[in-house]
Image (cartoon, rainbow, N blue to C red):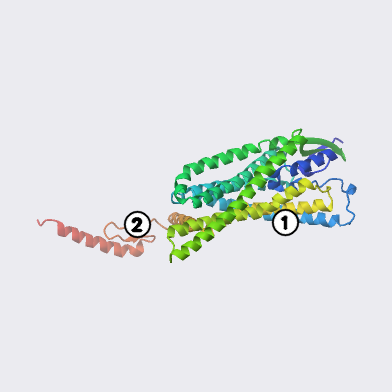
Amino acid sequence: MGATEVRKAIGPDSGSRNPIEKSSFFESRAANFAHFRAFIPSEMETSEWNRSGVVDADGDVEYYRECMEATRFWIQRVLLPIVAAVGMAGNSLSMIILTRKEMRSSIHWYLTGLAASDLLYLVFVFSLSFRHYPWNMPLSYWHYYPVGLWLSDSSSNTSVWLTVSFTVERYLAMKNPLKGKVWFTESRAKRVIALVYILCFLSVLSTPFEWRVQESHLVRDDRDESQISLVLSSLGANPGYRKGFYWFTVTVFIMVPLALLLVLNILLIYHVHRTFRQRTLLMAHTASQEIRENRVTVMLIAVSVLFLLCQSPTALVLIYSSFDQPVPNSRGDYILRICGNVFNLLMAMNAAINFLFYCALCDRYRRALISICRGTVSGFRDSSRCQDHRRNVGSPGLSPPLQNPFLGISINGDLNSELGHVTEAHQLTQIRLSDLRPAT
């Protein structure tokens, strides 16, 4: 009996690798901040490691493993698709609203760029989560996987620096309101956004080259099984590259932006509070333009604070794991994976719910959203009426409506019921026309 070939895609977290490859995979994920943003240690899970070789003295490893599996199921397969769907819809609406003519400003261009990067992040993170489903993913998926990591990393890094960019602009504009109108124009905002996108995508361009797809063949029970796995390439396993890339990402995408956001938001909150108190003391009311500017500032502060709250746990886990790497399949390893799944969800929520702040704190955004929703509902109703009208016209028992050219009487359907009225109208018309003819 000939061997039957069975292809099994096991991905980057499955077994049949030597301990060096397993350790390299785990360490490289810890050494790449962008990868942590995509799936912090949940992407490093190696479910088929030799569990019998590593057991905690406490004897409760199995309990934490079950907790990790439950967390992975509820977050990666239940909650993440919901958050991603809501975020994709919300960010798409934000891009439509913020690019309307009456909404255009430098700050709104930054928010548009942020919505686009968040949308890309949710799309690619959701595609990477397919590996958690009980599907036999094709070979093409594992070839796409490193590219998906790069794109999700780049999108998340872009969101980081766009948030820093509009926070810096807002602070400088409030400190120098007259010069701010000259400095911070729409064209300059577009150039900054384009530069941030280019630099962030190029900064982690090496990510796809850290991995390679490996296919191995095993004969089991007269079947030739083909196992597909994603393993580290020579670049990804290079200690010097891992160390250099780690400190680059930690510095550029964690320490510097989070420190800037923390300091600038404290200064913004202080400035808004002080300005409000001064204007309350000097005058009984504040100009509507100033009120609107303060609301925009408060909205940007809310977006930045949400970013800090959702990203800080990921940064802390990354820094912690760089100093204390738990033994694979130990209690500490499973706890780290549980935290990773939870913090991944926080990052996805951060990318998904910014539009709620826009609705709550920006009147123009809210009015534009209501206008779009009303237009959509009206268009749907008009389309339904047209379809109903065409359906009635096309029915065999009905004739198309007729219009009397003289009296404006519309006659629909059964002409016999209206024959008397039509005849009378025709006679009256003939009489009126005869009155207009010259006597003979």
The answer to whether the residue labelled 2 contacts the one labelled 1, judged by CB atoms less than 8 Å apart, is no
Q: Is residue 227 left or right of residue 377?
A: right
Give SS at disc 2. Answer: strand
Residue 155: x and y in percent read: 62, 44
The relative height of residue 171 versus residue 208 in the rendered view (above or below) is below
Report the front residue among 397 and 209.
209
Label placed on residue 424: none
Tell me the quarter of the picture where residue 124 sits. Answer: top right
Q: Is residue 12 left or right of residue 305?
A: right
Amino acid beneath label 1: Trp
Residue 434: x and y in percent read: 17, 58
Extreme residue toward the top, this view: 234
Label placed on residue 402: 2
How dense is the environment of label 2, judged by Cα within 10 Å: few (below 14), some, or many (20 and up)? few
Amino acid beneath label 2: Leu
Residue 314: x and y in percent read: 70, 51
The relative height of residue 131 versus residue 291 in the rendered view (above or below) is above
Look at mark 1 in the image and give the residue it sits on.
74
Q: Work out whether residue 429 can be spotted.
A: yes
- Residue that appears at 74% across and 43% down: 29
How dense is the environment of label 1, judged by Cα within 10 Å: few (below 14), some, or many (20 and up)? few
Extreme residue toward the left, this view: 440
Report the mark closest to the observer, 2 or 1. Answer: 1
Q: CA distance from mark 2 to mark 1?
A: 62 Å
Q: Is residue 383 left or right of residue 221?
A: left
Report the front residue among 307 and 228.
307
